[in-house]
Amino acid sequence: MEEKRTRRYILSFGMLAILLLALLIWNIHSGSLHLSVSEVLHILLFRSGENAAVIWDIRLPRILAAVLLGGALSVSGFLLQTFFANPIASPFILGISSGSRLMVSLALVGALAHGLIIGSALMITAAFVGAMLCMGFVLLISQKVRKMSLLIICGVMIGNICSAVTDFVVTFADDFNIVNLHNWSMGSFSGISWENIYIMAPVVLAALLLTFLLSKPISAYQMGEVYARNMGVNIRAFRLSLILLSSLLSACVAAFAGPISFVGIAVPHLVKSLFQTAKPLLIIPGSFLGGAAFSLFCDLIARTAFAPTELGISSVTAVLGAPVVIYIMVRRRMQAG
Amino acid sequence: MDTYKIRTEHMTVGYRGVPLIRDIEIHVRKGEILSLIGPNGAGKSTILKSIIRQLALIGGTVYLDGRAMRSLSEQTVAQSMSVLMTERVQPELMTCGDIVSTGRYPYTGLMGVLSAADRRKVREAMALVHAEELYDRDFSQISDGQRQRVLLARAICQEPEVIVLDEPTSFLDIRYKLELLSMLKQLVREKQLAVVMSLHEIDLAQKVSDHILCVRHNAVDRYGTSEEIFSGGYIAELYGITSGSYNEAFGFPELQAARGQPQVFVIGGGGSGLPIYRRLQQHGIPFAAGILHENDMDYPVASMLAAEVISEHAYQPITKQTLQSACAVMDACRYVFCPCQTFGPLNQANEHLRQRAGRKLCDEIPDLPCEA
């Protein structure tokens, strides 16, 4: 049985890796500009040719962003689900993404009004502040109400308030800024630059590494706080690190790609079903791979389905992810009943 | 080294800085079981939660194996104390083997990967509670009884010196209650563990515990050996039993007796009277029981349920006076039952009573008049 499980884990990782690789190739190859496989290969290897800029400056950063941010979003969702012991907790549902978005839009508009342009690091910082503020609210509420459905409703409300204020800010921003902001506030991987990637990659990767190192206490926490404490987990420090890491991960996503719904719920759930376990040691890397693949796939659809018109990434993730969430809730209700 | 595995000094417990129970002093040696009993809401769980550091102490000190617990790291405590609490564990996609494995947590490295030795200990712990066959089963899909066994295995797997259990037998049916407590008792004997637990089943607490701490009205009411606590009508007092009664020697309850002028006289003895006493109690008919020796097994139940008991001192022949008073009581009754069928030198008087009953003598319980 132990061997059977190990085989399942290896197969699952293999599947995710192949899926990701296939989507990487597909993504880099497809787009409004048709390039043959050999052309793409040539450009990738020698960084020359007439269309090198399309691949190197547009498609590659976008793909990397989708991989990093999609993975970050899923892992952040997994952390929040563990923290709140709630399978549909995610940065988007709990309003954390919207909080980040609000702070980023305020920072952007405020800076632009003074003729400044905000760098990636500042964007992340603003998003992180927004995430922590909303997380603080959610935590306050979660101490008062033990009922999980109520917590989710409060999160959704906080999210809506933040979105409303964001819309307000965007509406009153200068015309030129709106065009930029609009795209971003819809949620999109477009317009990511290498400068963004250089900041985003180390932050996301470091947060992911730290999260992975927390696998052991996370697995203890899955048994509930009482047992986790008895297993020797320093609950206060652990909870704090979990909050910081999940907020940081979702802040990165919100800063660069705006609101992306349902990835944080759907992917960890699908990955757990694939692995048939919830062990963080496996699910954290699994969620990263799965989230990366899922985002690449959704971005591919967003880019190509109605080309040249681009869809908001959330339109795609919602259509694919929401059914999974409904399925989780119905199944839980049936088990409880 | 302290002779006590777990000891408290002026422990004051409560919530959010507000003291609830003050100056709790308990001490448990290895191989001993301490049970906390008392009415619902008296504060048993609060005490347990404070011992395991789930709640911050308001005052005093808890010593784990002679060392003040507040100075110990989480890891150290985890390696010598494990718990089985009432919090419902509903993990996602975890097998029973996974659950038990979490007991090895304090012994694994940075990433929590189990070694071969750890795996063997998991198997051993599951074997101890007869749950080996559950190893690959999903934890959310087993019965309550199996779940408690798996959680007990988890607690054992942690190789503790002290186990703290909060109502481990609640929600279990009688078979599993007995099974779990028997296993616990055996483990305590074999592994020389010290156990602190709260129990709702006082009858079982009496039988399984070495010492008992009684908690009432947010205070420690009494603390002593099982024999000291279960005597002198204390249990009825502790729980404020007003209807019905509790037999402390044997550990069983009886419902409230029908009071009033006895309508029925029951000539019992040797256990023959028990079903009739209980049937009469259920019908709400006041009855008299006699003549019973005080060491007869009918006697404790008769004294809990009968309106009047005519008894004789243990091992003594029934005296004339006793017989006379029995006759007087019986004559005032409308019906007589005589479930007692054997008459020897010591209960000759009962045979006499039966003959005297004459036409009042009934055989069948269903014939009972229910007018009373």
Image (spheres, rainbow, N blue to C red):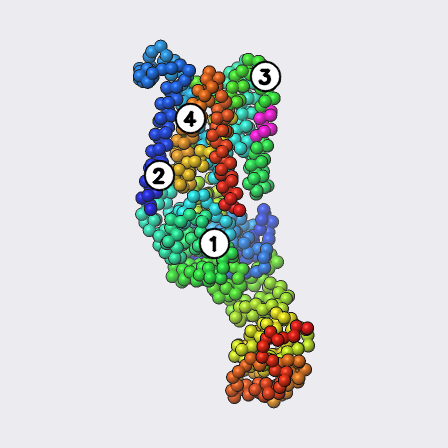
Which badge, 3 or 4, comes first in the chain's sequence?
3
Give the letter of the chain under mark 2. A
CA gap between label 1 and label 4 equals: 44 Å
Q: In percent of the image, x 34 and y 42: which residue is there?
A: A5
Q: Nearer the viewer, residue B28 or A209?
A: A209
Which kind of residue does numbered mark 4 sit on?
Phe
Few, some or many C-alpha atoms within 10 Å of disc 3 (few <14, some 14-19, many ≥20)? many
Q: Is residue A65 above or below residue B229?
A: above
Give the letter of the chain under mark 4. A
Which kind of residue does numbered mark 2 sit on?
Tyr
Which badge, 2 or 4, comes first in the chain's sequence?
2
Q: Nearer the viewer, residue A232 or A1?
A: A1
**Mark closer to the observer (2, 4):** 4
Relative image position of residue B332 (x, y in whole percent): 68, 82
Q: Which mark is residue A297?
A: 4
Few, some or many C-alpha atoms within 10 Å of disc 1 (few <14, some 14-19, many ≥20)? some
Residue B130 shows up from this direction: yes
Q: Is residue B336 left or right of residue A183?
A: right
CA gap between label 3 and label 1 equals: 60 Å
Few, some or many C-alpha atoms within 10 Å of disc 4 (few <14, some 14-19, many ≥20)? many
Residue on which disc 3 sits? A173
CA gap between label 2 and label 4 equals: 23 Å
